[in-house]
Image: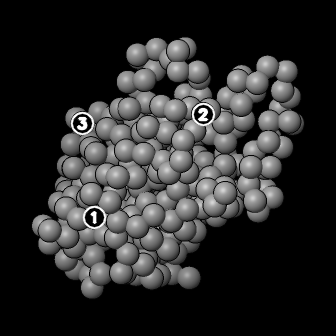
Amino acid sequence: MRDLKGKNAIVTGGSKGIGKSVCLTLANAGANVYILDIDKHEGLKTVKEVSELGVETDFYQINVANEIEWIDFSNVLKNKNILVDILVNNAGIWIGKDIDNVSVEEYQKLISINLTGVFLGIKHLVPLLTEAGKKTKFGSAIINLSSVAGLVGSQLDPLYSMTKGGITTFTKSMAIYFGKKNFPIRINQVHPGIIETEMGKQVANARINQNPGMTAEESYSAGVNQTPIGRLGTADEVAKTILFLSSDASSFMTGSSLVVDGGLTAQ
């Protein structure tokens, strides 16, 4: 399937985990993929894998919470005459501590990456998304990564839940905003459940920390037992959902939320 042939996609946090799977999935569909991440070593490895799929790709090392770096990146795109058809705001972190053990510095870092990074990416790429959107029938696409923790409470990390709840309502609000402004941009979000990634391991470790004596195997089983489908999800399953929202197959969707959680929030 090459539904995205010739389109340009920006993926934040694209070096590993869900972000890496998104990069490879979009590239397989024909999109040129530009990877943004703080981790240069893993980012360059992902660029190599993406390039083998026959599309244009590059890596840009940026801190998504730094506005100057977003301005510099957007200027690079403008100087190269690269418009943005797809923006995937994937970068995010997890603390996983009891709230009374979280420092203000840790809290501020969580907010800056999970919320400020999304705001800055949209703020500085909207002109390029708008210009690209005017050239297509159904406009350009923004996909924000929220979480099931943005739909229901998370006792393992209430602060993470707070940031993802913010993404949930922000995405809906921006859909209305773009519509009122007649910007040709669709914006939707994905809510992953427990996924087999590095962050998924952090969730398991947080469960152990809050349940002294629990083993790693028991923590993993607890995650599986929470999920009606009987297993954890994969990064590729989330990426395929993002591919759908990036394509014209989702042309009448904006402000929507797709839950990829194996039934976790159906209970």
Q: Earlier in the sequence, mark 3 or mark 1?
A: 3
Task: Give the position of the N terminus as an image quadrant.
Answer: bottom right
| 232 or 35: nearer the viewer | 232
Q: For the residue labelled by badge 1, is the local secondary structure a helix, a strand or a loop?
A: helix
Circle number at residue 45: none
Q: Where is residue 227 drawn, in percent x and y?
A: 73, 54
Disc 2/disc 1 C-alpha distance (Å): 30 Å
Residue drawn at the location 12% of the way across and 67% of the way down:
181
Q: Amino acid at mark 2?
A: Gln
Of the residues under marks 2 and 3, which one precedes in the sequence?
A: 3
Q: Is residue 136 above or below residue 191?
A: below
Q: Which residue: 46% across, 53% down?
A: 145
**Mark positioned earlier in the residue sequence (2 or 1):** 2
Mark pair 3, 1: CA separation: 23 Å
Do tag 3 and tag 1 residues touch (Cβ < 8 Å)? Answer: no
Is residue 125 left or right of 52 when viewed as pictured?
A: left
Q: Which residue is mark 2?
A: 155
The location of residue 100, given as percent across then percent down, is 52, 15
In the displayed structure, 48 sits above or below 208; it is below
Residue type, mark 3 in image: Glu
Residue that badge 3 annotates: 67
Most foreground residue, 132 or 171: 171
Residue under numbered circle 1: 175
